[in-house]
């Protein structure tokens, strides 16, 4: 176990974290990037990215992440496996306890840990995620021109995904496990009124089928007139099963921001766990959080857009705000920490 001191730690290695790392490293902040449990974030689940600026022929999600990491390393950013399990942020320096057992005392922290899309537990979803199975219509919808698609969910997100996908698909079927939607009436009406969108009530996705080479080819749906059919099937109740030909399946059952380690730290979040960022004195957005020295970027603070390009933008904002904060600390103390490691050193 070590006790390490840093000026800046970036938690997360998706597009937001990598963008922050590039900006911070170019500013000589010597950032340390903690890669987390899923290095590269959600983008690594996307096979092709066609809407990221500068890649007119598209780019693989993994390739885009790897290029970002190489760029950050080129300017001096350091990368390390591990995540923050616990944090004490009530004074300087910030104390970060890692999953590796190490402790880092940092003057500033950028939270770019992202939000994980919820999966439904269907058979083969792990194998086919990113190969016709997706959690982002905006990212992958254009790959499904002329396809018959399924959208799994019943909230506003599902309605939005279905309406977007209807621009490309021949048909979109919203699969919902109950007979009532959670979506707002206006969003539900828009979906109901669209001639390409239909509903399968009291139905759930049991399995997706296909291959990584061919993509999704069909899906197994299970239904029961009283709803929640998978639960009923597990209890031994008779249900109906049907295999349908589809060219893609989209999950729209929500996201969970990866902010559990911020519990009890004073960083303000909404009821779902997304981090609130602050505005400046003129009312303009910043990456600052409610705790001095802590900044947020990417999906962890963005339940609405969740795009690679917006994550990159807020990552740069967070690095610039962190640089300004550290300059303020240096002006006050006349000293800097940079990076030091002392195996037996206690916290200052």
Image (spheres, rainbow, N blue to C red):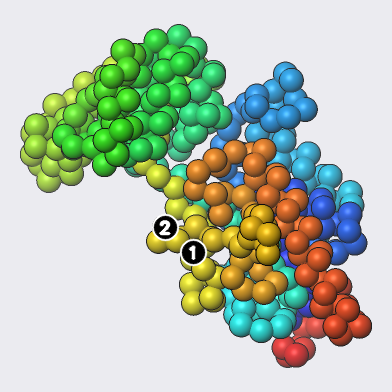
Q: Is residue 268 above or below residue 223?
A: below
At numbered mark 1, what does the secondary structure look like: helix, strand or loop? loop
Q: Quadrant of the C terminus?
A: bottom right
Task: Report the residue marked by disc 1.
Answer: 269
Q: Are dots 1 and 2 in contact, CB under 8 Å?
A: yes
Q: Nearer the viewer, residue 23 or 140?
A: 23
Q: Is residue 192 above or below residue 114?
A: above
Q: Is residue 341 above or below residue 181?
A: below
Quadrant of residue 335 in the image?
Answer: bottom right
Q: Which mark is residue 204?
A: none
Q: Residues within 10 Å of mark 1 (few under 14, many from 20)?
A: some
In the rendered image, residue 144, in percent from the top left (x then y), is placed at 49, 16
In the rendered image, residue 5, in percent from the top left (x then y), is placed at 78, 77
Q: Is residue 32 visible?
A: no
**Left or right placement of residue 324 versus residue 91 in this view:** right
Q: How many marks?
A: 2
**Left or right placement of residue 315 versus residue 333 in this view:** left
* Residue under the point 68% across and 64% down: 281
In the rendered image, residue 82, in percent from the top left (x then y), is placed at 64, 63
* Residue under the point 54% across and 49% down: 302
In the rendered image, residue 41, in percent from the top left (x then y), is placed at 60, 46
Task: Report the residue marked by disc 2.
Answer: 272
At numbered mark 2, what does the secondary structure look like: helix, strand or loop? loop
Instruction: State the separation of the CA atoms marked 1 and 2.
Output: 8 Å
Q: Nearer the viewer, residue 60 or 208?
A: 60
* Residue under the point 85% across and 71% down: 327
* Residue under the point 81% across and 66% down: 324
């Amino acid at each position: 176990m070590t006790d390490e001191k840093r000026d800046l730690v970036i938690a997360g290695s998706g597009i937001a974290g990598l963008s922050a790392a590039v900006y911070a490293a170019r500013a000589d902040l010597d950032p340390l990037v903690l890669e987390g449990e899923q290095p590269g974030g959600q983008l690594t689940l996307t096979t092709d990215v066609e809407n990221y600026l500068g890649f007119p022929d598209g780019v693989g999600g993994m390739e885009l992440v790897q290029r970002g990491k190489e760029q950050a390393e080129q300017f001096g950013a350091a990368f390390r496996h591990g995540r923050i399990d616990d944090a004490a942020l009530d004074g300087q320096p910030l104390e970060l306890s890692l999953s590796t057992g190490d402790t880092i005392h940092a003057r500033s922290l950028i939270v770019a840990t992202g939000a994980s899309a919820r999966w439904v537990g269907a058979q083969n979803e792990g194998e086919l995620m990113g190969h016709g199975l997706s959690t982002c219509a905006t990212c992958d919808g254009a790959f499904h021109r002329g396809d018959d698609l399924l959208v799994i969910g019943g909230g506003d997100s599902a309605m939005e995904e279905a309406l977007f996908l209807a621009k490309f698909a021949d048909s979109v079927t919203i699969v919902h496990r109950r007979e009532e939607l959670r979506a707002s009436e206006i969003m539900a009406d828009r979906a109901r009124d669209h001639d390409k969108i239909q509903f399968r009530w009291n139905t759930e996705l049991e399995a997706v089928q296909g291959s990584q080479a061919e993509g999704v080819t069909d899906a197994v749906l299970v239904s029961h007139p009283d709803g929640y059919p998978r639960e009923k099937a597990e209890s031994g109740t008779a249900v109906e099963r049907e295999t349908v030909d589809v060219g893609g399946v989209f999950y729209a059952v929500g996201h969970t921001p990866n902010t559990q380690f911020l519990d009890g730290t004073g960083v303000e979040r909404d009821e779902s766990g997304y981090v609130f960022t602050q505005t400046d004195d003129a009312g303009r957005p910043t990456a600052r959080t409610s705790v001095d020295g802590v900044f947020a970027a990417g999906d962890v603070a963005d339940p609405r857009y969740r795009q690679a390009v917006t994550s990159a933008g807020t990552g740069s904002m967070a690095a610039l705000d962190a640089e300004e904060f550290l300059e303020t600390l240096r002006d006050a103390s006349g000293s800097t920490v940079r990076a030091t490691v002392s195996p037996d050193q206690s916290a200052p």
